[in-house]
Every structure is written in C-alpha cells, then in structure tokens.
Amino acid sequence: MNAARMVLVSLYAMAYLLAAWAGASALASGDFLYAAGLFSTSAGLLLAVRREFCHAARLLRVVAVYRHGAPYVGPVDELAAIERASALPPECRCETWWTSLGERHDPYCPMLLWWKETR
C-alpha cells in the first residue's frame, strides 16, 4: 500500500469515527433522523475503508505471484482491473472540461485519449 492510499484510508477511518460519534450524540439527544443519516454515512465510510484494504490485498497477491514466477491463479479480468486501477491517468488540461462541469473534454485532451485507450 503506497503512502497516498494510507493517507486516504486514514482519512476515511477518521471520518468514519467522527460520523459514528456524531450519530451516537444525535441519538442520545433524540434526533433520530440525524442519527440515521450519520450512521448510514459512517457505514458508507466503513465500506470505503474495506474497499481500499481489499484492493491493497489483491495488489499484494499479484506482486507475490510475479515475484515467485508462478502462474497467476485467478480470473484474468481481476488482474486487468487491478492493473487498470493502479495506473495513474494523465492530467486534464483542457478548458472544455472545466466549463462543462466535467462532462466533456477537448478532442486533443490527454485524459480523453487515455480514457479511450483503457476501455
């Protein structure tokens, strides 16, 4: 797990604890709708932490297989998804993306070209 992913997991975990604490406080004060919203938010953050750890475990498994030179046992689609998720996309530098609120890219934008190549 790289440093950026560890920071992300730490932020998710801190936000989870804060949402769970705020939900418990809201429940203690009798605000049941706020408590339900905060508890559902904390559940979503807990799922995000789980997703990050599962992704890291899959990457570790693939790296271990590559190091030992053994054939990869598992679905090929999973390996492709891991490599695609771990690749860093190029930065978007086009003006159309900013003015369209992230809906469209210029035809020469490296982000659009990268997106077409990965599909």
Image (tube, rainbow, N blue to C red):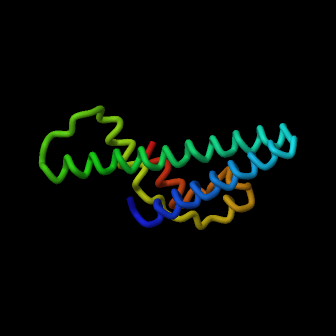
**89 is higher (above) or lower (below) than 32:** below
x and y percent of residue 10 in the render? Answer: 53, 60
Q: Residue at x 30, y 50 (%)?
A: 60
User: Residue lying furthest top in this view?
Assistant: 75
* Quadrant of image for the N terminus: bottom left
Residue in front for this viewpoint, 74 or 34: 34
Is 24 positioned to the left or the right of 68 in the image?
Answer: right
The x, y position of residue 31, in whole percent, is: 87, 42
Q: Which residue is drawn at 63% across and 41% down?
A: 43
**Residue 33 location, x and y as percent?**
84, 38
Q: Which residue lies furthest to the right in this view?
A: 30
Q: Which of 31 and 50 is in front in this view?
A: 31
Q: Is residue 74 above or below residue 99?
A: above
Residue furthest front as drawn: 28
Image quarter of the C terminus: top left
Q: With 87 as the anchor, is 104 left or right in this view? A: right
Residue drawn at point x = 53 percent, y = 65 percent: 91
Total marks placed? 0
Q: Residue at x 34, y 45 (%)?
A: 58
Frontmost residue, 52 versus 94: 52
